Amino acid sequence: MARRRVTAADVAREAGVSQTTVSYVLNDVPHQKIAAGTRQRIHAAVEKLGYTPSAAARTLRKGQSDIVLLLLPDMPLGHTAIELVEELTQVLQKQGLSVITRIEDGGSNAAQWADLAPRAVVVLAPVEASRRKRMEAAGIQVINAWRRDPGETAQDTLARSQHHVGRLQARYLAAAGHQHLGYAAPADPGLGPFYELRLQGVRDFCANLGLPEPVVRVIDADADEAATAVREWRDAGVTAVCAFNDEAAFALLAGARMAGLAIPEDLAVIGVDDIPVARFAHPPLTTVDQRMSVVAEGLAQAILRGEESTVNSGRPRGTSATVVARDSA
Amino acid sequence: MARRRVTAADVAREAGVSQTTVSYVLNDVPHQKIAAGTRQRIHAAVEKLGYTPSAAARTLRKGQSDIVLLLLPDMPLGHTAIELVEELTQVLQKQGLSVITRIEDGGSNAAQWADLAPRAVVVLAPVEASRRKRMEAAGIQVINAWRRDPGETAQDTLARSQHHVGRLQARYLAAAGHQHLGYAAPADPGLGPFYELRLQGVRDFCANLGLPEPVVRVIDADADEAATAVREWRDAGVTAVCAFNDEAAFALLAGARMAGLAIPEDLAVIGVDDIPVARFAHPPLTTVDQRMSVVAEGLAQAILRGEESTVNSGRPRGTSATVVARDSA
DNA sequence: CTGAAAGCGCTTACAG
DNA sequence: CTGAAAGCGCTTACAG
């Protein structure tokens, strides 16, 4: 029980070479020509002994681990955020990187990143500039999904794509002939950053087309409240509404039923996320699929290439969202 | 840039003590009486220098990291599984433990656990007995959520609770006067273990009450198919069906609309998960809330106490699921 | 082409 | 009550 760990030294002994050579072979160190026979003997020894390199020792020596830290805001994660985490974990796993998520408790524990010596930190929560500076000073690649100061040109994959999502909703609705749009905002204040970006996308699109400003209503997770909002929209002449996400859209559908309004005839509704049950809504929900797999792929690439967070802000990325047209709009 | 990391030696120098004392104080080592003044000076130095202990060095020295490895099956994670991961991550974070999830690629990479020297491995995917043995031999606590061999009395928190969920669905339906039950199974084969356990719960309950066997139909994510299943159930005299999860339940609701059947009058439906939109279904969905926070808490406790995986199989745990009664049943 | 040795930053017997 | 020193398992200059 708890027998000693197999080390590189064991492998070296088994293969009749030095530990150095084992390390060279296992890490495919370039410019080190190792005889093919030696190479084989080492791989055979690894196999035979069931050797697995110690991540801790490697990290200690190199000063950097194979961990990617994902800093999440302390709010209920939506379908899309979860998908991002899942996809990113999966993509990075194939590259030998592990994802650790930490929820920002936004307080004392401001040094939550240093212990792991992560390869990169992906920031999905607003982070103070000073903290980011410290991370970068420690040689950690910081990928900031949120534009924060106006002056900063941080890589804003997510921020960009959120704005795009709003535009997409508005464009779809406008193309269907709607002029007067509503916006169903979430009640949770933690969702603020997302919500504002998406709404801004809707606003900008309306402004560009000379349409009136969208009429914003907050929709809590409550059908009665949604019914009230639906009536107000109708009275205000709104014929179509962009919901912050599919959950809000479902609430709207329920509210409309309660208010005796027909969807999409009296009010068209478009959501965001394309959650699995969206197709089973009554009527089936038209929504925006954010294709987080594409965003995750982009983030993973940035991490693997070790890109500076500022380098690629100009490149359109994560803008692969697409409308899934069903019956609600 | 990339300035040298602050180490315990730096703290020791700053505080005018030895590194040993720093370690004792920071780790609250028992039976080491350190003068209060010394203690204070050390904490002040830590604060001043912004010291964060290196997880890698600590792991290397202790032979065990502060990481909990979560082995997930390679299948689409349902709402509940995701909730479990989230909750567990959160609970363990408070105890200074980090969760890393790895998806089982069920193949070559069978030693995916050794590199991290994890404190514990939580297995949500079926794992070969030999692999588990090897983990335990390496001194790693293995928490197996799945009963595997009949002979094994592994801690089966999840398995147990899945069976319970099925019972709960059947009991609710039977209490409402239904005698002839149906079961809506998922198409994804990866869900098999969950599905079988839940269905068994329904079966066992029916058997105990002398009710006929539940009529099982597979429901793919397709309303047409669901409509067919709904008609078949009606023709077979089934008056209520337990859906594998809320997604399947939503499909059933859509199928019933298509088939012109009224819910719950013609067919009662009960789901599992209580996903956020369940309340907005048409009609609002009756379902089972698995309260994963309770399960996560239980797992976290087991990990923190370092319990043997076999010790607590007798204790009822994770059986806190509860029916959320709405209109669909 | 291969190896001996230093050192990454901790924890912990051991000595005082 | 406190400290000097060994050693965890790697990688990598350096020497040959």
Image (cartoon, coloured by chain):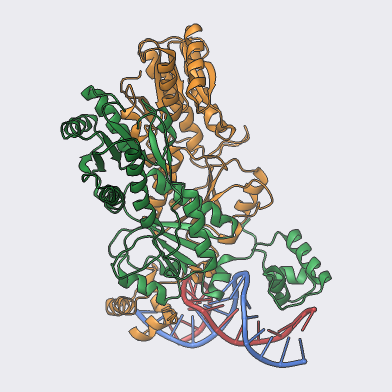
Chain colours: A green, B orange, C red, D blue
Q: Is residue B101 visible?
A: no
Task: Name the residue located 44 percent from the left edge and 27 percent from the top edge.
Answer: B165
A192, above or below D13, in the image: above
| Residue A44 shown left or right of residue A314 in the figure | right
Residue A107 at x, y percent in the picture: 27, 63
Q: Position of residue A129 (x, y in %)?
A: 31, 70
The residue furthest right is A37
Q: Quadrant of the C terminus of chain A?
A: top left
* A98 horizontally vs A220: left or right: right
The quarter of the image holding the N terminus of chain A is bottom right
Which one is nearer the viewer's eye here, B152 or A232? A232
Instruction: Identify which residue is drawn at 42% across, 78% down.
Output: B8
Q: Is residue A12 above or below residue A224?
A: below
Residue under the point 50% across and 28% down: B221
On screen, residue A162 versus residue B228, left or right, reads left
Q: Is residue B155 left or right of residue A329?
A: right
Q: How many marks?
A: 0
Q: Is residue B50 visible?
A: yes
Q: Position of residue B23 (x, y in %)?
A: 41, 74
- x and y percent of residue B109 in the render? 66, 53
Q: Decide which of A211, B189 is in the foreground and name it.
A: A211
In the picture shown, does residue A1 fall above or below B149? below
Q: Quadrant of residue B250?
A: top left
